[in-house]
Image (cartoon, coloured by chain):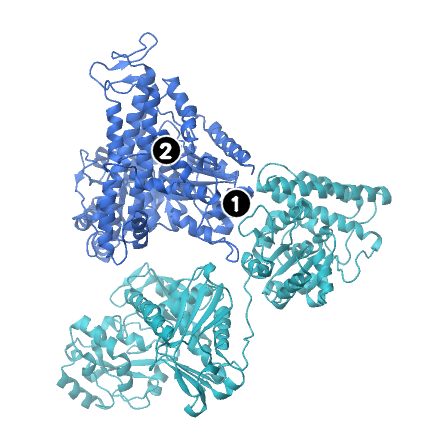
Amino acid sequence: MTLLDLIFNGNDTVYERVEKAVSEAVEKYGTDKAVAFPDTAYSLPSYYAMTGNKVANLGDLKEAMGVVKSMMTRNKRLHDGFQSGWATLLCAEFYEALKYIDGAKPYEAPYTGHLSDAYVREQGVPLVTGDIPGVAVIIGPAPTAEQGAALVKSYQGQGMLVAMIGGVIDQCVEQGVKTGPNVRILPLGQDILSVAHVISVAVRAALIFGNITPGDAKGLNEYTFKRVFAFVNAFAPLDNVTLACGAGAIAMGFPAITNDYPYRVPKSLIVQPDVDKWNATSLEARDIKIKITKIDIPVAFASAFEGEIIRRGDMQIEFDGSRVDCFELVQTKEASEVEDHKIEIIGPDIADFPVGSKQSIGYIVEVAGKSMQPDFEPVIERKFHSYLNCVEGMMHTGQRDMIRIRVSKDTFNAGFGLKHLGEVLYARVKSEFAAVVDKCQVKIYTDPEQCTKLRHEVAIPLFDKRDERLLTLTDEGVDVYYSCIMCQAFSPSHVCVVTPERLGLCGAVSWLDAKATNELDPQGPCQVITKERPIDERIGEYEDVNEAVRKFSQGALDDVSLYSIIEKPMTSCGCFECICGIEPLSNGVCIANREYAGMTPIGMTFPELASMTGGGVQTPGFMGHGKHFISSKKFMKAEGGVGRIVWMPKDLKEQVKDRLNATAKELYGIDNFCDMIGDETVAEDPETLLAFLEEKGHPALTMEPMM
Amino acid sequence: MGDFKLTSVEEFEAATNRLLETGKKVGADGWQYRVANQTPHCKFGETGICCRICSMGPCRITPKAPRGICGCDAHGIVARNYLRFTAGGAATHSDHGRSICHTLYCTAPDGNYKVKDPEKLIRIAKEWGVETEGKDIYDLAHEVAYLGLSEYGKVFGNQNFLKRAPEHTQELWQREGIAPRAIDREVSCSMHMTHMGCSSKAEALIRQSLRAGLSDGWGGSMAGTEFSDVLFGTPKPIDTEANLGVMNADNVNIVVHGHDPALSEMICEYADSPEMIAYAKEMGAKGITISGVCCTSNEVAMRRGIPMAGNFLQQENVILTGACEAIVVDVQCIFPALGPLAKCFHTKFVTTSEIAQMPESDYIRFEPENAGENAKAIVKLAIENFKNRKPELVHIPDMKQKATVGYSFEAIVKTLDTVTNSQVDETGTTKPLIDCVKSGVIRGAVAMVGCNNPKIRPDTAHIELMKKLIANDIIIVASGCAAQAAAKAGLMDKAAKDLCGAGLKRVCELADIPPVLHMGSCVDISRMMILVAELAKDSGWKISELPVVGCAPEWMSEKAVSIGNYVVATGIDTFLGVDPYISGSDQVYKLLTEGVREWVEAAYTIETDIDKLVDRMIDRIEEKRDALGI
C-alpha cells in the first residue's frame, strides 16, 4: 500500500471505532448529555481550535463526527493525508472525552490523561521562552526497558517535556523512572488515542499564547509548525492507527522518528534503526538546540580567572608554541563528519608528561551547521583565548600556532585532564555560537610528530588562506558594512561603522566578526548597512550609512565619514585601543595606545586625550580607533593616509611595523616608513619631533595643510 | 509574505499594449503585426509535407499527388524535414558548447577569462581520465578544453558524457544504435541522410533524430553547461527580479540578449566597475542597470543575480521602453526586427558574434582575446548614448517579481542536504527527493522548458500549467524562456509556496525553496539529464520509471526539437503544446508518439489544448506511480 493508503486506513479504523463509541454513548445517555474535559475553558480543545465550534453535549459530538467525516477526503495528495491525520486526532479527542462523562476519573496514577488549562499555562511560558527546549511524545515500548527509560531520561536531562503513551510507560515504571507533571514526564495513557491529551496541550498553547482564532486551522498549523518544538518517537512496529495520528502530528509540524518503516520523508518521517541515537536524531529533525549551561570540569569556570597568572613553579605543564609545534584551529565540516560532543585525545594526557615540562599541543574544534560559514572560523577561534583563561588554574596566551598554555599543579591535582580542555571548548562554542554551530567535536593532539605534521600541513595552510581572504576583503569589494553598538550600554549615542578595512575602534570587532554577530543574532548589536548611495567617496560618506547612524544613535548623530578625522569623523565610545590626534606643527597626527602611560607631543597623555574624544561625540581632529586600523589603506584616507602619522609609542610601533611599512610602500613607495615615525625615545614635545621628522624627510611635512 | 500576488498574463499584455502605443508614435513594427501578416500559415509547411530539398520541386503532397517527383511519400518527407529540424537544433546548441570549450581553452590566470570553479574542472578531468595531480589548474583547463573540443570530431567511440547515464539507459542506446558518436558527425550524418536520394524510411530518419538529439543533450549542450560552470562558477541559489520593471529609468540600461555567457559575463563585469559607474554619472545617469533577455539572461541571473527583463517574445518590449541605451546580443533567438526597431529609438543594437550578424546593427566582434576591451567599449557606447534618450518616449512598466534562481544540479543536491538528518542520512545524494516522491509528499516532477510562440498566448501555457502542477504537489524544474515566464509571474518567489498543495508546500518550507526551480538556460537542460540520471541511480528505478515528464508547451525553435529528442531518448515522456510539423504523416506521428517507446521507453505526447495537456501530464505521472506501487 502507498503511504497515503496506510494513513487513510488508520484513519478509517479510528473513525469506525469512535463512531461506534459515540453511538453507544448516545444510546446510553441521550444527546443532551454534557461532554467536557475537566479544568479547561476550551471544549473540546482540538476540535474547537480547528473548526471554531464548541462541543457541549453528545448531540454536538455526533454532529462533530459528521464534520470530521467531511475532512476524510481520499485524493492521492498529502493534503488529504494531513486532513485524515487531523481527523484521527479529533476522533481520539472525542473518544477520550467520552471517558470523562459524569465527572468520571478515567485515569489513575501514574497515568495523567487530560491536562488542565492551568498546567498548559504553567508549562507554556517556559516552552515559549525556550527554557523547555521541546516536547517529546514517545509511543509504544522500546526494544528493551533500559532503552525506553534511557531515552526518557535523556530528554528529561535536557529539560524537555516528555509525554508517553503505551509500553514505554511500563518500561519506565519497571526501571524506576520517577514520572508525573512535576518532573515533566507525563504518562498519558495506554491507548494510542490518549495522544489527544498532548495534542490538546499544543493546541491550547496556540490559542493561549499564539492568539490563534478558533477555526483558523491554517493559522493553528502554522503556529505549531513554527513555534511548538514537539516531535514524536514511535517504536516499531508502526501500525496504521499510530501512523494516522502521526500524520496529524506532521501536519502540525512535528516530525516522527521510528526504527523501522518502509517509507520515509525528510525532516518529517525519519527511520533511525539505532534507538540509542533517537535523542540526537530527534533534536536535529526538529532543529532543537540544547543550551549548555554547565561545563563538566573539576575546577571552576568564571571570567574572574581570566587575568590569572600561573608562575613557573606552580605549573604542572606548559604547552609552548614558541618552542615546539602547537596550534589551535576551528574547521568547518559536513554534518555527517561530526559527532556532537565527541572529544578525542590523540597522544599522552597531562598526567603522562613530566611535571613542569614543555610539550606540544594542537587542538582542532570541528564544527558543522547549516548556517556555518568558513568566514566564522577565525571568529570562533579568537574566543578560545577567553574560554581557556576562564578555567581556574589555566593560562592561555597568543593565537593560531603561537599559543602558550599553562596548567597549574592545583588544577591538575583536582583531576583536570585534556578531556576537560575539550569540554570547555565544546560547551562554550555550542552555547555562544548556537545559531551557526549545530554539531561540534574536539580533537586534541599531544603526540609531537602529529602536532608538527598537522601544524604545517593543515593549520598553517589554512591560516594563510584566511589571511589571503582578509587581504582580498576591501571596502570596495563588499556590498554591505555593519553597524556595531555593543558598547551603547555606557556610550548610548556611539555607533561604530565596521568595514573590511576599518575594524571597530575597540579592536575586537572586524568586519567578519560583525558579519558573524549579525548572522548569530540578526536583531543584535551588528546590523547590515548598505552602501548603495555614496555621497562623497573621498571621505567615505554614504547616505545609507548616515541613515543607519542616525537610527542607531537615536538621532544624536547626523552624518559620519569613514575615512576622515577632520570632516565628520566617526565617534568614539571610550573603549578605543588607540587615539590619534592632530599635531599642528608637523602637519601630522600622533597616535597613543591605551597601554602607553607617558606624554605625547600633542601635550596630552592617553587619558587626557580619551576624556575629550569619548562619549559618542564627534571631535574633528581626534579619533579613537583599533590598532589594526593604523596600517589600513583607509586610515585617514581623506587627509592623505598613513603618511600623516608622525609619532607613536615605541611599543605600538613595533606591533604595527610590518603591516604599516607594507602599506606605506604601496601608497608612497617609501621603504621602512616606521623608521621615520617618532616615538617617546625621540621626542615628547612638538619641536624636537619636528626636527626629527625634518631629518628623516617625513612625507607629512610636504603634504597639504590639514586645517 | 502577506502581499504576495502573482502577476497575471492579462497584466503582462496590458503592459505590452501600452508599449505598443509608444511604438506606434515612432512608427515601429512589432511581432504582433507581423504574425497577423503571416496568418494563415502555409498548410503544406505546417503539416510537414512540403519538400524543397532538391531543385526538381518544390514538391507538395496532396491526395492527388501522393508522391514527390523522386517518389518520396509523405512519411519520408515529413521524417526528413523533422530530422533536418533536429539537426539544426543540435548544431546550434552544440556549436554554443564548442564556443564555450574554446573560451575555456583561452583561459589564463591574467587573461580575460579565468577558471572560477577549479573543483568542478578537476571533477570533470577525473571523470575523463585526465591526470590532475600536481597539475597547474590552467594547464588542466587547456587539456580538458582540448578534449572537449575533440568530442566534436572524435574519430571513434561515443560521447564521453554518456557514461553519466544509468547503465540501463546506456544499454538501451547501444541496443538501439542511437548512442551518439562525434557531435559534428551526427549533424553531418543527418544532413547526409536527408539529402536527395538518401533515406526516405521514416523509422531510420526518426532513429537518427534521436541520435542527433542525444549528441546535443549528452554532448554539446552538456559541454556548454559544464564548462560554463568551470569558467563562470557553478550556479547556487541567488535572489533576483524579473520582468520589465527591473529596468531603471534613472540609469543607463544595457540589455544582454542571446545565449553565450562569455559575452554577458564580461559586460556585467565591466558595467560593475567603479570606473564605468563614475562615467555613467558623469554622463548624467545615476548608475548602470544590466538586465537580460532570453537565455543569456538566465545565465547571468543564475550566477550573478542580474535581473531578467523578459523572455523571447518580450525582446522588442525592452526597446519599446525607450529607456534602453543598448541591446547587446550574441547568438540565437534574436529577432532581426531589433535593428529596424532600435532605429526608431536612440537604442544601439550591438551584434557581437560571427554567427549572428544582422543588418542595421553595430557589429563589435567578440573573441576571448579582445573580450575585455570590447566589453568596455560596449559599456561605454551605451553610457555615451544615455544623453540621446528621448524622455517623452520613456515608459518602463512598473511590473516585476522577486525570484530565487540558481538551482544547478550541484545546488539542488546541496539544498537536499539541508533536509537530511546527519544521524541517519548520507549527504550529497538525491535521496531526500526520492523519499518525498516515494511517500507521495511530492507526486512527481515536470521539467518545463522551451520558448514562447505566438501560436500560444505568450506565457499562458507556461504559467497555467505550472500553477496547476504545483497545486497538485508536482515540483517543477524550469529552464529557458519557460523559467523566465515563471519568474515574471512570481512562481520563483519563495512565497509561491502558498499556491502549492500541502505536500509541495511543506517541502518548500523545509528546504527553503520556491516551487519552481530555475535550472538555467536552454543548454542547461543537460543539468536536468544529470538530475534524472542521479535520481535513477539513487532510487534503483529506471529513468523511464521515474514519475517525471518533460514539457515544452510554447516551443518554437529547432533547438527545442533537438531537446525533445534527447529528453525522450533519455527515457522521459515529453509533452509538446505545438505540433512539430509532423501531422502530414500518420506514420511519423505514430512513431514519435508511440513507436519510439519500444526503443527508449518514452515517447512524445502532442496536445495543443493546454488544459488537456496538463491533465495528461498529471495522469501520466500518476500512472508511473501506480506502476511503481507508490
Label 2 sits on what residue type? Trp
First in sequence: mark 1 or mark 2?
A: 2
> Element type at marker 2?
helix
Q: Residue at x 40, y 23 (%)?
A: B591
Residue A33 versus residue A615: which sits nearer the camera? A33
| Chain identifier, colour blue | B
Give how far across and how far down residue A521 sits, in percent. Answer: 47, 65
Give how far across and how far down residue B429 sits, in percent. Answer: 45, 49
Residue under label 2: B173
- Mark 1 and mark 2 residues within 8 Å of each other at the beta carbon: no
Tag count in the figure?
2
Residue A608 versus residue A79: which sits nearer the camera? A79
| Chain identifier, colour cyan | A
> Element type at marker 1?
helix
Give the position of the C terminus of chain A as an image quadrant: bottom left
Instruction: Judge whether residue A513 can be spotted in this image.
Output: no
What number is the disc on residue A199? none
Q: Chain of mark 2?
A: B
Residue A530 location, quadrant: bottom left
Q: Residue at x 40, y 42 (%)?
A: B487
